[in-house]
Image (tube, rainbow, N blue to C red):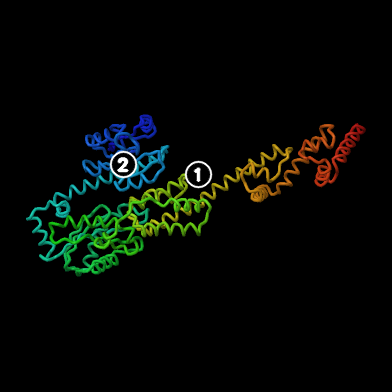
Amino acid sequence: MHLNRAILVDDEVFTRKGLLKLIDWEACGFQIVDEADNGEDALELIERLQPDVVITDIRMPVLDGLELIRRVVTQDIVKPYFIIVSGYDDFNYAQQAVRYGVHDFILKPIDELEFSNALVRLSGRLESDREARLREERLLSGALMESLIIGEADEALLQEWERRLELLPEDRLFYVFVERNDLPLSKDEGEAGGGEFKDRVEEALLAVTNGAQPFYLHEHRNRIGIIVPGSILQSSQDCQREFARRIQQSLVTDNDRIFVYFGQPVQQLSLIQNAYETAKEALLYKYVYDESGIVIHEEAALHALQYIGLEESLYELLLEQIEELHFDKLEETITLLFQSFQAKLYAPEAVKMAINQCVLGVVRVLSSMEGDQSRLSSLEPMTEWHDRNLSLRELKRLFTDFAVESANYISHLRKEQHKGGIQKIRAYIEANFHENISLKSIAGKFYMNPVYLGQLFKKAYGVYFNDFLLQLRVNEAKRLLRQTDLRIYEVAERVGFGNPDYFVTQFEKIERMTPSEYRSRLMKEAASEGTNR
Protein backbone atom coordinates (compact mmCIF):
# COMPACT_ATOMS: atom_id res chain seq x y z
CA MET A 1 0.00 0.00 0.00
CA HIS A 2 1.38 3.39 -0.97
CA LEU A 3 1.56 5.77 2.00
CA ASN A 4 1.40 9.50 1.43
CA ARG A 5 4.07 11.56 3.17
CA ALA A 6 2.88 14.16 5.68
CA ILE A 7 4.41 16.56 8.19
CA LEU A 8 2.81 18.06 11.31
CA VAL A 9 3.35 21.72 12.17
CA ASP A 10 2.16 23.04 15.55
CA ASP A 11 3.93 25.00 18.27
CA GLU A 12 2.27 22.86 20.96
CA VAL A 13 4.15 19.59 21.36
CA PHE A 14 1.17 18.00 23.15
CA THR A 15 -1.03 18.75 20.16
CA ARG A 16 1.41 17.09 17.77
CA LYS A 17 1.90 14.05 19.98
CA GLY A 18 -1.84 13.87 20.57
CA LEU A 19 -2.50 13.82 16.83
CA LEU A 20 0.08 11.09 16.34
CA LYS A 21 -1.71 8.89 18.85
CA LEU A 22 -5.30 9.88 18.01
CA ILE A 23 -5.20 9.05 14.30
CA ASP A 24 -4.44 5.70 12.68
CA TRP A 25 -2.32 7.37 10.02
CA GLU A 26 -1.40 4.23 8.11
CA ALA A 27 -5.05 3.13 7.88
CA CYS A 28 -5.85 6.56 6.44
CA GLY A 29 -3.07 6.19 3.86
CA PHE A 30 -0.37 8.41 5.42
CA GLN A 31 2.92 8.36 7.25
CA ILE A 32 4.25 11.26 9.33
CA VAL A 33 7.77 11.87 8.05
CA ASP A 34 8.64 14.79 10.35
CA GLU A 35 7.34 17.51 12.67
CA ALA A 36 8.00 21.20 13.23
CA ASP A 37 7.03 23.64 15.98
CA ASN A 38 7.17 26.80 13.88
CA GLY A 39 6.59 27.91 10.31
CA GLU A 40 10.21 28.68 9.50
CA ASP A 41 11.43 25.18 10.36
CA ALA A 42 8.41 23.77 8.54
CA LEU A 43 9.37 25.67 5.37
CA GLU A 44 12.81 24.06 5.42
CA LEU A 45 11.25 20.61 5.95
CA ILE A 46 8.84 21.11 3.06
CA GLU A 47 11.64 22.12 0.69
CA ARG A 48 13.82 19.20 1.79
CA LEU A 49 11.26 16.39 2.21
CA GLN A 50 8.66 17.50 -0.36
CA PRO A 51 5.69 15.93 1.48
CA ASP A 52 2.33 15.22 -0.08
CA VAL A 53 0.46 16.89 2.77
CA VAL A 54 1.22 19.56 5.37
CA ILE A 55 -1.03 19.69 8.45
CA THR A 56 -0.48 23.01 10.17
CA ASP A 57 -1.83 25.25 12.90
CA ILE A 58 -2.67 28.90 12.13
CA ARG A 59 -0.99 30.81 14.94
CA MET A 60 2.66 29.94 15.53
CA PRO A 61 5.83 31.85 16.42
CA VAL A 62 8.39 33.01 13.85
CA LEU A 63 6.18 32.25 10.83
CA ASP A 64 2.44 31.64 11.16
CA GLY A 65 0.49 29.01 9.24
CA LEU A 66 -0.99 31.30 6.60
CA GLU A 67 2.37 32.90 5.82
CA LEU A 68 3.94 29.43 5.58
CA ILE A 69 1.28 28.39 3.06
CA ARG A 70 1.66 31.63 1.11
CA ARG A 71 5.43 31.18 0.79
CA VAL A 72 5.16 27.57 -0.32
CA VAL A 73 2.50 28.43 -2.89
CA THR A 74 4.22 31.54 -4.25
CA GLN A 75 7.73 30.05 -4.32
CA ASP A 76 6.31 27.03 -6.18
CA ILE A 77 9.07 24.76 -4.87
CA VAL A 78 6.72 21.91 -4.10
CA LYS A 79 2.92 21.62 -4.16
CA PRO A 80 1.65 19.75 -1.10
CA TYR A 81 -1.94 19.76 -0.01
CA PHE A 82 -2.52 21.81 3.13
CA ILE A 83 -4.89 21.02 5.99
CA ILE A 84 -5.33 23.76 8.56
CA VAL A 85 -5.98 22.64 12.13
CA SER A 86 -6.94 25.55 14.37
CA GLY A 87 -8.55 26.19 17.71
CA TYR A 88 -9.91 29.48 16.46
CA ASP A 89 -13.45 29.14 15.13
CA ASP A 90 -12.92 32.06 12.79
CA PHE A 91 -13.72 31.59 9.15
CA ASN A 92 -11.79 34.76 8.33
CA TYR A 93 -8.75 32.52 8.37
CA ALA A 94 -10.51 30.14 6.03
CA GLN A 95 -11.30 33.05 3.70
CA GLN A 96 -7.60 33.79 3.40
CA ALA A 97 -6.69 30.13 3.21
CA VAL A 98 -8.90 29.34 0.20
CA ARG A 99 -6.89 31.82 -1.85
CA TYR A 100 -3.90 29.54 -1.48
CA GLY A 101 -5.81 26.37 -2.32
CA VAL A 102 -5.99 24.95 1.22
CA HIS A 103 -7.64 21.54 1.04
CA ASP A 104 -9.45 21.53 4.39
CA PHE A 105 -10.01 23.50 7.59
CA ILE A 106 -10.38 21.40 10.78
CA LEU A 107 -11.38 22.95 14.11
CA LYS A 108 -10.01 21.96 17.51
CA PRO A 109 -10.89 19.99 19.54
CA ILE A 110 -10.33 17.47 16.78
CA ASP A 111 -13.01 14.88 16.15
CA GLU A 112 -11.20 11.61 15.35
CA LEU A 113 -13.81 10.34 12.90
CA GLU A 114 -14.13 13.67 11.10
CA PHE A 115 -10.35 14.06 10.73
CA SER A 116 -9.85 10.44 9.67
CA ASN A 117 -12.56 10.75 7.03
CA ALA A 118 -10.94 13.92 5.73
CA LEU A 119 -7.59 12.12 5.48
CA VAL A 120 -9.11 9.13 3.71
CA ARG A 121 -10.76 11.43 1.16
CA LEU A 122 -7.50 13.30 0.67
CA SER A 123 -5.61 10.01 0.27
CA GLY A 124 -8.05 9.08 -2.49
CA ARG A 125 -7.55 12.45 -4.10
CA LEU A 126 -3.75 12.05 -3.97
CA GLU A 127 -4.10 8.61 -5.53
CA SER A 128 -6.23 10.11 -8.29
CA ASP A 129 -3.61 12.83 -8.76
CA ARG A 130 -0.88 10.21 -9.10
CA GLU A 131 -2.88 8.19 -11.61
CA ALA A 132 -3.60 11.33 -13.60
CA ARG A 133 0.06 12.27 -13.60
CA LEU A 134 1.01 8.80 -14.80
CA ARG A 135 -1.51 8.96 -17.62
CA GLU A 136 -0.33 12.40 -18.64
CA GLU A 137 3.31 11.31 -18.52
CA ARG A 138 2.54 8.40 -20.82
CA LEU A 139 0.71 10.69 -23.23
CA LEU A 140 3.50 13.27 -23.24
CA SER A 141 5.76 10.87 -25.10
CA GLY A 142 3.71 11.00 -28.27
CA ALA A 143 1.09 13.77 -28.07
CA LEU A 144 1.37 17.34 -29.23
CA MET A 145 -1.19 18.89 -26.93
CA GLU A 146 0.85 18.49 -23.78
CA SER A 147 3.88 20.02 -25.49
CA LEU A 148 1.79 22.96 -26.62
CA ILE A 149 0.28 23.50 -23.20
CA ILE A 150 3.66 23.63 -21.51
CA GLY A 151 5.15 25.65 -24.36
CA GLU A 152 7.82 23.12 -25.37
CA ALA A 153 6.73 22.09 -28.86
CA ASP A 154 9.54 22.56 -31.39
CA GLU A 155 9.06 24.29 -34.76
CA ALA A 156 8.90 21.10 -36.82
CA LEU A 157 6.18 19.67 -34.59
CA LEU A 158 4.21 22.92 -34.73
CA GLN A 159 4.28 22.96 -38.50
CA GLU A 160 3.19 19.33 -38.66
CA TRP A 161 0.17 19.93 -36.44
CA GLU A 162 -0.77 23.18 -38.15
CA ARG A 163 -1.00 21.09 -41.29
CA ARG A 164 -3.04 18.33 -39.60
CA LEU A 165 -5.47 20.81 -38.07
CA GLU A 166 -5.74 22.64 -41.40
CA LEU A 167 -5.02 25.96 -39.75
CA LEU A 168 -4.98 29.13 -41.81
CA PRO A 169 -2.20 31.70 -41.28
CA GLU A 170 -4.70 34.32 -40.12
CA ASP A 171 -6.63 31.94 -37.84
CA ARG A 172 -7.20 32.88 -34.26
CA LEU A 173 -7.10 29.85 -31.98
CA PHE A 174 -9.19 29.20 -28.90
CA TYR A 175 -8.73 26.62 -26.20
CA VAL A 176 -12.11 25.32 -25.08
CA PHE A 177 -13.10 23.06 -22.20
CA VAL A 178 -16.23 20.93 -22.44
CA GLU A 179 -17.36 19.63 -19.06
CA ARG A 180 -20.04 17.18 -18.03
CA ASN A 181 -21.88 18.03 -14.80
CA ASP A 182 -24.48 16.58 -12.42
CA LEU A 183 -23.97 12.90 -13.10
CA PRO A 184 -25.82 10.77 -10.53
CA LEU A 185 -23.64 9.74 -7.61
CA SER A 186 -24.52 6.10 -8.22
CA LYS A 187 -23.12 6.16 -11.77
CA ASP A 188 -20.00 3.99 -11.78
CA GLU A 189 -16.67 5.38 -12.88
CA GLY A 190 -16.49 3.20 -15.95
CA GLU A 191 -19.76 4.52 -17.30
CA ALA A 192 -18.86 8.09 -16.33
CA GLY A 193 -15.28 7.84 -17.60
CA GLY A 194 -13.62 10.41 -19.82
CA GLY A 195 -13.07 8.03 -22.75
CA GLU A 196 -16.76 7.59 -23.45
CA PHE A 197 -17.38 11.31 -23.02
CA LYS A 198 -14.45 12.18 -25.28
CA ASP A 199 -16.03 10.09 -28.04
CA ARG A 200 -19.34 11.90 -27.58
CA VAL A 201 -17.62 15.30 -27.78
CA GLU A 202 -15.86 14.27 -30.97
CA GLU A 203 -19.17 13.21 -32.51
CA ALA A 204 -20.74 16.52 -31.47
CA LEU A 205 -17.91 18.48 -33.12
CA LEU A 206 -18.33 16.50 -36.31
CA ALA A 207 -22.06 17.28 -36.26
CA VAL A 208 -21.53 21.00 -35.59
CA THR A 209 -18.98 21.42 -38.40
CA ASN A 210 -20.41 18.79 -40.76
CA GLY A 211 -17.05 17.05 -40.55
CA ALA A 212 -15.32 19.92 -42.37
CA GLN A 213 -12.90 20.77 -39.57
CA PRO A 214 -10.45 18.38 -37.86
CA PHE A 215 -10.08 18.86 -34.09
CA TYR A 216 -7.60 17.71 -31.51
CA LEU A 217 -9.23 16.57 -28.25
CA HIS A 218 -7.42 16.08 -24.99
CA GLU A 219 -8.66 14.56 -21.73
CA HIS A 220 -8.10 16.77 -18.69
CA ARG A 221 -9.21 14.37 -15.96
CA ASN A 222 -12.91 15.22 -15.78
CA ARG A 223 -13.28 17.47 -18.82
CA ILE A 224 -12.26 17.56 -22.48
CA GLY A 225 -9.98 20.22 -23.98
CA ILE A 226 -10.25 21.26 -27.65
CA ILE A 227 -8.28 23.56 -29.94
CA VAL A 228 -10.94 25.50 -31.86
CA PRO A 229 -9.87 27.50 -34.94
CA GLY A 230 -11.49 30.89 -35.30
CA SER A 231 -12.22 30.15 -38.97
CA ILE A 232 -15.29 28.16 -37.92
CA LEU A 233 -16.47 31.13 -35.85
CA GLN A 234 -16.97 34.78 -36.59
CA SER A 235 -15.18 37.50 -34.69
CA SER A 236 -17.92 38.31 -32.18
CA GLN A 237 -18.37 36.70 -28.79
CA ASP A 238 -21.93 35.83 -29.77
CA CYS A 239 -20.54 33.36 -32.28
CA GLN A 240 -18.45 31.75 -29.56
CA ARG A 241 -21.61 31.46 -27.54
CA GLU A 242 -23.57 30.02 -30.46
CA PHE A 243 -20.86 27.40 -31.02
CA ALA A 244 -21.01 26.51 -27.32
CA ARG A 245 -24.82 26.22 -27.43
CA ARG A 246 -24.68 23.83 -30.38
CA ILE A 247 -22.13 21.68 -28.54
CA GLN A 248 -24.41 21.64 -25.49
CA GLN A 249 -27.44 20.66 -27.55
CA SER A 250 -25.53 17.82 -29.16
CA LEU A 251 -24.27 16.43 -25.84
CA VAL A 252 -27.00 17.03 -23.30
CA THR A 253 -28.93 14.11 -21.80
CA ASP A 254 -31.55 13.78 -19.10
CA ASN A 255 -28.87 12.88 -16.56
CA ASP A 256 -26.34 15.69 -16.93
CA ARG A 257 -25.60 19.29 -17.87
CA ILE A 258 -22.87 20.40 -20.26
CA PHE A 259 -20.69 23.44 -19.52
CA VAL A 260 -18.42 25.07 -22.14
CA TYR A 261 -15.51 27.39 -21.30
CA PHE A 262 -13.76 29.59 -23.88
CA GLY A 263 -10.25 30.91 -23.23
CA GLN A 264 -8.80 34.05 -24.81
CA PRO A 265 -7.84 33.64 -28.51
CA VAL A 266 -4.20 33.57 -29.64
CA GLN A 267 -2.75 34.26 -33.09
CA GLN A 268 -0.64 31.17 -33.57
CA LEU A 269 -0.34 27.58 -32.39
CA SER A 270 2.90 28.21 -30.52
CA LEU A 271 0.97 30.49 -28.16
CA ILE A 272 -1.83 28.03 -27.40
CA GLN A 273 -0.50 27.75 -23.86
CA ASN A 274 -1.90 31.24 -23.18
CA ALA A 275 -5.30 30.21 -24.56
CA TYR A 276 -5.22 27.14 -22.34
CA GLU A 277 -4.38 29.16 -19.21
CA THR A 278 -7.23 31.59 -19.80
CA ALA A 279 -9.60 28.68 -20.41
CA LYS A 280 -8.59 27.37 -16.97
CA GLU A 281 -9.32 30.80 -15.52
CA ALA A 282 -12.74 30.66 -17.17
CA LEU A 283 -13.47 27.51 -15.14
CA LEU A 284 -13.41 29.62 -11.98
CA TYR A 285 -16.46 31.57 -13.21
CA LYS A 286 -18.56 28.41 -13.45
CA TYR A 287 -21.09 29.32 -10.75
CA VAL A 288 -21.43 32.90 -11.95
CA TYR A 289 -22.69 31.66 -15.34
CA ASP A 290 -24.65 28.69 -14.04
CA GLU A 291 -27.85 29.45 -15.96
CA SER A 292 -26.28 29.24 -19.42
CA GLY A 293 -23.37 26.95 -18.64
CA ILE A 294 -21.23 29.01 -21.04
CA VAL A 295 -18.21 31.01 -19.87
CA ILE A 296 -16.30 33.26 -22.27
CA HIS A 297 -13.12 34.51 -20.68
CA GLU A 298 -13.17 37.86 -22.49
CA GLU A 299 -16.37 38.89 -20.72
CA ALA A 300 -15.93 36.92 -17.48
CA ALA A 301 -12.52 38.46 -16.75
CA LEU A 302 -14.12 41.91 -16.54
CA HIS A 303 -15.42 40.87 -13.11
CA ALA A 304 -13.19 40.06 -10.12
CA LEU A 305 -14.04 36.83 -8.34
CA GLN A 306 -14.53 37.03 -4.59
CA TYR A 307 -12.95 34.85 -1.92
CA ILE A 308 -15.16 35.93 0.96
CA GLY A 309 -16.78 34.07 3.81
CA LEU A 310 -20.44 33.36 4.34
CA GLU A 311 -22.41 36.23 5.86
CA GLU A 312 -22.77 35.34 9.55
CA SER A 313 -26.40 36.48 9.83
CA LEU A 314 -27.38 34.31 6.86
CA TYR A 315 -25.54 31.32 8.35
CA GLU A 316 -27.28 31.73 11.72
CA LEU A 317 -30.69 32.19 10.07
CA LEU A 318 -30.20 29.01 8.06
CA LEU A 319 -29.34 26.93 11.13
CA GLU A 320 -32.23 28.46 13.09
CA GLN A 321 -34.75 27.57 10.37
CA ILE A 322 -33.39 24.03 10.12
CA GLU A 323 -33.74 23.57 13.89
CA GLU A 324 -37.21 25.15 14.00
CA LEU A 325 -38.54 23.27 10.94
CA HIS A 326 -39.53 26.42 9.06
CA PHE A 327 -39.47 24.65 5.71
CA ASP A 328 -41.00 27.44 3.61
CA LYS A 329 -38.65 30.04 5.06
CA LEU A 330 -35.76 27.59 4.83
CA GLU A 331 -36.17 27.18 1.07
CA GLU A 332 -36.30 30.96 0.71
CA THR A 333 -33.09 31.33 2.72
CA ILE A 334 -31.31 28.64 0.69
CA THR A 335 -32.40 30.41 -2.49
CA LEU A 336 -31.04 33.68 -1.06
CA LEU A 337 -27.78 31.93 -0.16
CA PHE A 338 -27.22 30.58 -3.66
CA GLN A 339 -28.27 33.83 -5.27
CA SER A 340 -25.61 35.56 -3.19
CA PHE A 341 -22.98 33.18 -4.56
CA GLN A 342 -23.76 34.49 -8.03
CA ALA A 343 -24.48 38.11 -7.17
CA LYS A 344 -21.27 38.44 -5.14
CA LEU A 345 -19.19 36.50 -7.71
CA TYR A 346 -18.06 33.75 -5.36
CA ALA A 347 -15.12 31.70 -6.59
CA PRO A 348 -15.67 27.91 -6.45
CA GLU A 349 -13.37 27.57 -3.42
CA ALA A 350 -15.34 30.25 -1.58
CA VAL A 351 -18.60 28.40 -2.38
CA LYS A 352 -17.02 25.20 -1.11
CA MET A 353 -15.98 26.84 2.15
CA ALA A 354 -19.44 28.39 2.66
CA ILE A 355 -21.26 25.10 2.03
CA ASN A 356 -18.85 23.18 4.25
CA GLN A 357 -19.40 25.74 7.03
CA CYS A 358 -23.18 25.18 6.84
CA VAL A 359 -22.85 21.40 6.76
CA LEU A 360 -20.44 21.47 9.71
CA GLY A 361 -22.88 23.68 11.64
CA VAL A 362 -25.73 21.21 11.11
CA VAL A 363 -23.53 18.26 12.09
CA ARG A 364 -22.62 20.07 15.30
CA VAL A 365 -26.30 20.55 16.12
CA LEU A 366 -26.92 16.83 15.57
CA SER A 367 -23.92 15.99 17.73
CA SER A 368 -25.18 18.24 20.55
CA MET A 369 -28.49 16.33 20.42
CA GLU A 370 -26.63 12.98 20.47
CA GLY A 371 -27.78 12.21 16.94
CA ASP A 372 -26.12 9.77 14.55
CA GLN A 373 -25.02 11.72 11.48
CA SER A 374 -24.52 8.49 9.52
CA ARG A 375 -28.33 8.18 9.41
CA LEU A 376 -28.43 11.12 6.98
CA SER A 377 -28.35 9.68 3.47
CA SER A 378 -27.78 13.19 2.11
CA LEU A 379 -24.62 13.80 4.15
CA GLU A 380 -22.22 11.84 1.93
CA PRO A 381 -23.11 13.82 -1.22
CA MET A 382 -22.61 17.03 0.77
CA THR A 383 -19.17 16.00 2.00
CA GLU A 384 -17.95 14.79 -1.38
CA TRP A 385 -19.64 17.15 -3.83
CA HIS A 386 -16.49 19.20 -4.50
CA ASP A 387 -14.83 16.11 -5.97
CA ARG A 388 -17.54 15.98 -8.64
CA ASN A 389 -18.56 18.33 -11.46
CA LEU A 390 -21.73 19.94 -10.17
CA SER A 391 -23.66 22.93 -11.44
CA LEU A 392 -24.81 25.47 -8.88
CA ARG A 393 -28.38 24.34 -9.58
CA GLU A 394 -27.57 20.74 -8.67
CA LEU A 395 -25.52 21.81 -5.67
CA LYS A 396 -28.52 23.79 -4.43
CA ARG A 397 -30.76 20.73 -4.85
CA LEU A 398 -28.35 18.53 -2.90
CA PHE A 399 -27.99 21.14 -0.17
CA THR A 400 -31.77 21.59 0.08
CA ASP A 401 -32.20 17.81 0.42
CA PHE A 402 -29.57 17.82 3.16
CA ALA A 403 -31.17 20.74 5.01
CA VAL A 404 -34.68 19.24 4.87
CA GLU A 405 -33.52 15.76 5.89
CA SER A 406 -31.48 17.26 8.73
CA ALA A 407 -34.49 19.29 9.92
CA ASN A 408 -36.69 16.19 9.96
CA TYR A 409 -34.01 14.23 11.83
CA ILE A 410 -33.65 17.05 14.36
CA SER A 411 -37.43 16.93 14.84
CA HIS A 412 -37.19 13.18 15.46
CA LEU A 413 -34.37 13.67 17.97
CA ARG A 414 -36.33 16.39 19.74
CA LYS A 415 -39.35 14.08 20.07
CA GLU A 416 -37.12 11.37 21.50
CA GLN A 417 -35.66 13.87 23.94
CA HIS A 418 -39.13 15.03 24.94
CA LYS A 419 -40.19 11.44 25.44
CA GLY A 420 -37.27 10.94 27.80
CA GLY A 421 -37.92 14.36 29.35
CA ILE A 422 -41.56 13.68 30.15
CA GLN A 423 -40.54 10.45 31.84
CA LYS A 424 -38.14 12.41 34.03
CA ILE A 425 -40.92 14.88 34.84
CA ARG A 426 -43.29 12.07 35.86
CA ALA A 427 -40.59 10.58 38.10
CA TYR A 428 -40.08 13.99 39.66
CA ILE A 429 -43.82 14.36 40.36
CA GLU A 430 -44.02 10.88 41.90
CA ALA A 431 -41.07 11.68 44.16
CA ASN A 432 -42.28 15.15 45.20
CA PHE A 433 -46.09 15.07 45.11
CA HIS A 434 -46.20 15.71 48.87
CA GLU A 435 -44.54 19.09 48.30
CA ASN A 436 -46.27 22.27 47.19
CA ILE A 437 -45.78 21.63 43.45
CA SER A 438 -47.79 22.81 40.49
CA LEU A 439 -47.69 22.59 36.71
CA LYS A 440 -46.16 26.07 36.61
CA SER A 441 -43.41 25.31 39.14
CA ILE A 442 -42.47 22.05 37.41
CA ALA A 443 -42.43 23.76 33.99
CA GLY A 444 -40.06 26.36 35.41
CA LYS A 445 -37.77 23.70 36.83
CA PHE A 446 -37.54 21.91 33.48
CA TYR A 447 -37.37 25.12 31.40
CA MET A 448 -40.64 24.48 29.59
CA ASN A 449 -43.78 26.42 28.81
CA PRO A 450 -46.53 25.38 31.31
CA VAL A 451 -49.23 25.14 28.66
CA TYR A 452 -46.98 23.03 26.41
CA LEU A 453 -46.00 20.83 29.38
CA GLY A 454 -49.65 20.23 30.21
CA GLN A 455 -50.40 19.22 26.63
CA LEU A 456 -47.32 16.99 26.44
CA PHE A 457 -48.21 15.27 29.73
CA LYS A 458 -51.78 14.58 28.64
CA LYS A 459 -50.56 13.23 25.30
CA ALA A 460 -47.98 10.97 26.94
CA TYR A 461 -50.09 9.54 29.78
CA GLY A 462 -53.70 10.14 28.79
CA VAL A 463 -54.48 12.11 31.93
CA TYR A 464 -54.24 15.76 32.89
CA PHE A 465 -51.45 16.82 35.22
CA ASN A 466 -53.78 17.96 38.03
CA ASP A 467 -55.75 14.71 37.94
CA PHE A 468 -52.52 12.68 37.99
CA LEU A 469 -51.18 14.67 40.95
CA LEU A 470 -54.48 14.40 42.85
CA GLN A 471 -54.61 10.62 42.34
CA LEU A 472 -51.04 10.27 43.66
CA ARG A 473 -51.91 12.30 46.77
CA VAL A 474 -55.17 10.45 47.43
CA ASN A 475 -53.48 7.05 47.03
CA GLU A 476 -50.83 8.08 49.54
CA ALA A 477 -53.49 9.46 51.87
CA LYS A 478 -55.34 6.13 51.76
CA ARG A 479 -52.12 4.33 52.69
CA LEU A 480 -51.55 6.64 55.64
CA LEU A 481 -55.18 6.23 56.76
CA ARG A 482 -54.76 2.47 56.60
CA GLN A 483 -51.35 2.17 58.23
CA THR A 484 -51.16 5.05 60.76
CA ASP A 485 -53.28 6.78 63.34
CA LEU A 486 -52.42 10.23 62.02
CA ARG A 487 -55.18 12.76 62.25
CA ILE A 488 -56.90 13.93 59.11
CA TYR A 489 -55.17 17.31 59.01
CA GLU A 490 -51.80 15.56 59.53
CA VAL A 491 -52.51 13.23 56.60
CA ALA A 492 -53.46 16.25 54.51
CA GLU A 493 -50.12 17.90 55.28
CA ARG A 494 -48.19 14.70 54.56
CA VAL A 495 -49.62 14.40 51.05
CA GLY A 496 -49.23 18.04 50.05
CA PHE A 497 -52.50 19.72 51.03
CA GLY A 498 -52.11 22.91 53.00
CA ASN A 499 -55.85 23.14 53.67
CA PRO A 500 -57.44 20.12 55.40
CA ASP A 501 -60.95 21.05 54.24
CA TYR A 502 -59.77 21.15 50.61
CA PHE A 503 -58.11 17.78 51.15
CA VAL A 504 -61.36 16.30 52.40
CA THR A 505 -63.23 17.70 49.41
CA GLN A 506 -60.73 16.33 46.89
CA PHE A 507 -60.53 12.94 48.64
CA GLU A 508 -64.30 12.62 48.57
CA LYS A 509 -64.30 13.60 44.87
CA ILE A 510 -62.09 10.60 44.06
CA GLU A 511 -63.25 7.99 46.59
CA ARG A 512 -66.93 8.95 47.00
CA MET A 513 -66.37 9.18 50.76
CA THR A 514 -64.52 11.41 53.19
CA PRO A 515 -61.19 10.37 54.75
CA SER A 516 -62.98 9.80 58.08
CA GLU A 517 -65.55 7.60 56.41
CA TYR A 518 -62.79 5.68 54.66
CA ARG A 519 -61.00 5.04 57.95
CA SER A 520 -64.25 4.14 59.73
CA ARG A 521 -65.08 1.63 57.00
CA LEU A 522 -61.69 0.03 57.45
CA MET A 523 -62.21 -0.23 61.21
CA LYS A 524 -65.68 -1.75 60.78
CA GLU A 525 -64.34 -4.30 58.31
CA ALA A 526 -61.54 -5.17 60.73
CA ALA A 527 -63.99 -5.56 63.61
CA SER A 528 -66.29 -7.68 61.48
CA GLU A 529 -63.42 -9.90 60.45
CA GLY A 530 -62.46 -10.37 64.11
CA THR A 531 -66.02 -11.34 65.07
CA ASN A 532 -66.22 -13.88 62.26
CA ARG A 533 -63.11 -15.54 63.55
Task: Label 1: state its secondary structure.
Answer: loop
In the depicted view, which residue is nearer to us: 35 or 310? 310
Task: Label 2: state its secondary structure.
Answer: helix
The residue tagged 1 is 371
- Amino acid identity at mark 1: Gly
Circles 2 and 1, Cβ within 8 Å, touching? The answer is no
**Left or right of residue 254: residue 198:** left
The residue tagged 2 is 66
Identity of the residue furthest to the left in this view: 156
Q: Quadrant of the C terminus?
A: top right
Q: Quadrant of the N terminus?
A: top left
Residue 148, picture quadrant: bottom left
**Left or right of residue 192: residue 521:** right
**Where is residue 460 drawn, in percent x and y?**
65, 48
- Of the two numbered discs 2 and 1 on the same chain, state the one appearing first in sequence: 2
- Amino acid identity at mark 2: Leu
**Residue appearing at x 30%, y 48% in the figure:** 99
Residue 494, picture quadrant: top right
**Where is residue 48 drawn, in percent x and y?**
22, 34
In the depicted view, which residue is nearer to us: 365 or 371? 365
Q: For the residue carrying disc 1, how many other residues have a C-alpha within 10 Å: few (<14), some (14-19), or many (20+)?
A: some
Q: For the residue carrying disc 2, how many other residues have a C-alpha within 10 Å: few (<14), some (14-19), or many (20+)?
A: many
**Where is residue 515 drawn, in percent x and y?**
84, 40
Distance in Å between CA atoms under marks 2 and 1: 34 Å
Q: Nearer the viewer, mark 2 or mark 1?
A: 2
Identity of the residue furthest to the right in this view: 531
- Whether residue 271 is visible, yes or no, is yes
